[in-house]
Image (cartoon, rainbow, N blue to C red):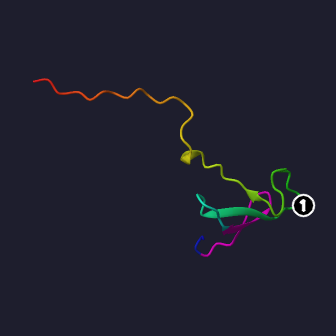
């Protein structure tokens, strides 16, 4: 769990809560309270904001060709 952080407020006014996460994600961020003037439809009170962890997924683009080992001449 985060050290000392339990809540945060977004620029739109919504309040977030931090909870223990699941395997692969140490923290779950949940919309604790949705602000009355928040225009974002993805902010729903009581539901988590998902982190799809793109950096941890294998790349979908073909990688650069690997270079063969070479020996120095001489």
26 and 16: which one is in front?
26
30 and 24: which one is in front?
24
Q: In the image as oriented, which residue stretches furthest toward the right?
A: 36
**Which quadrant of the figure has residue 20?**
bottom right
Task: Specify the segment rendered in magenta.
Answer: 4-19
Give the vertical position of 56 relative to 9 (above or below): above
Q: Which residue is mark 1?
A: 36
**Which quadrant of the figure has residue 71?**
top left
Name the residue at 68% across, 69% down. Answer: 19
Name the residue at 44% across, 28% down. Answer: 64
Q: Position of residue 74 (x, y in %)?
A: 9, 24
Give the vertical position of 36 relative to 19 (above or below): above
Q: Position of residue 58 (x, y in %)?
A: 54, 41
Q: In the image as oriented, which residue stretches furthest toward the top?
A: 73
Query: Would residue 18 be counted in the magenta stretch?
Result: yes
Q: Position of residue 61 (x, y in %)?
A: 55, 31
Name the residue at 57% across, 34% down. Answer: 60
Q: Quadrant of the N terminus?
A: bottom right
Q: Residues within 10 Å of mark 1 (few under 14, many from 20)?
A: few
Give the vertical position of 39 relative to 2 (above or below): above
Q: Position of residue 5 (x, y in %)?
A: 64, 72
All told, the count of numbered labels is 1
Name the residue at 58% across, 58% down. Answer: 24
Query: Would residue 34 be counted in the magenta stretch?
Result: no
**Which quadrant of the figure has residue 8?**
bottom right
């Amino acid at each position: 769990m985060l050290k000392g952080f339990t809540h945060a407020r977004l620029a739109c006014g919504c309040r977030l809560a931090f909870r223990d996460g699941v395997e692969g994600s140490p923290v779950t961020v949940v919309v604790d309270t949705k602000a009355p003037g928040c225009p974002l439809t993805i902010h729903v009170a009581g539901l988590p904001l998902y982190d799809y962890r793109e950096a941890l997924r294998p790349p979908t683009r073909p990688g650069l060709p690997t270079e063969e080992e070479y020996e120095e001449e001489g």
